[in-house]
Amino acid sequence: MKEEYKDFIGIFEESVPVELCEEFVRCYELSKKNETIIDVSKENEIGATDMMDRRTRKDEVAFVTPTFSTIFPPPPVLEYFKILKECFQLYLKRYSIEFDGILYNDVFKIHKVRKSEGFHGWHYEKSSSQNLERFITYMTYLEVPEKGGETEFLHQSLRMKPVVGKTLLWPAGFTHMHRGNPPLVGEKMYITGWFHASKINHEHFES
């Protein structure tokens, strides 16, 4: 794995093996074919919803957690989380980040973006009162277009080229406003999620 850091953006090239990325893609496409992906754009039986306005976002979204998934067959979550944890620990060490509390990662999403589609508005990950516990954002590219599809950061003036197996980590706050540029040739699939900072004192709760 190759590490690089730019303006508090951690760039981890070759972090996730190509074979593992392909397994995620295979699980997603098979679930799509067999109609075993739960539509999270409306009320559903697992209670997972995507609150994004579908008029501004044009892509497919599936929620994944260690305990349930909106796609079947489920992807290799635990193997991915092991790699993600390593990237996260390297990021914390690089910026000397200490947190006196519980950090957890209980859900992520898989996005499928076709040519010219996606969500291209500038945004950050703590922009609503429901998302204030988001601490660090992560993204891993599973499938990339031949052209386009960059992840662009506004205030850092950076465009990240999508590469299969590359993972990005960055702060969830307004300093890292970003957007996804549309694929121009081909399609893009990626994982995105957050490390959350819990407001619960677990030690007191357990006692």
Image (spheres, rainbow, N blue to C red):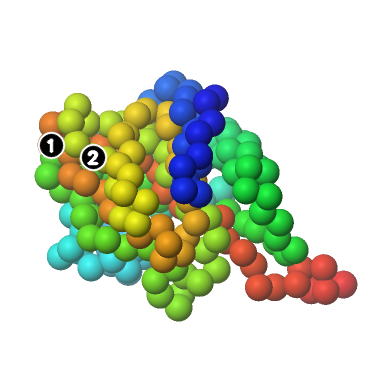
Residue type for callout 1: Leu
Q: Residue furthest bottom?
A: 129
Residue 18 position by quadrant: top left
Indicate whether 96 appears above or below 160: below
**Dots 1, 2 in contact, CB < 8 A:** yes
Give the residue at x 53% y 31%.
Answer: 3
| Front one among 68 and 50 | 50
Give the residue at x 47% y 60%.
Answer: 172
Indicate whether 70 appears above or below 164: below
State the residue position of label 1: 184
| Front one among 158 and 69 | 158
x, y percentage for residue 207?
87, 72
Residue 183 position by quadrant: top left
The total of numbered circles placed on residues is 2
Of mark 1 and mark 2, the one earlier in the sequence is 2
- Category of crowding for the residue at label 1, using alpha-carbon neighbours closer than 10 angstroms: few (below 14), some (14–19), many (at least 20): some
Secondary element type, mark 2: loop
- The answer to whether residue 62 shows anywhere in this view is no
- The answer to whether residue 84 shows anywhere in this view is yes
x, y percentage for residue 196?
57, 61
Indicate whether 8 appears above or below 166: below
Residue type for callout 2: Gly
x, y percentage for residue 117?
16, 48
State the residue position of label 2: 149
Q: Is residue 189 left or right of residue 137?
A: left
Q: Is residue 42 left or right of residue 21?
A: left
Disc 1 from disc 2: Cα separation? 7 Å
Indicate whether 33 appears above or below 64: above
Secondary element type, mark 1: strand
Q: Residue furthest right?
A: 207
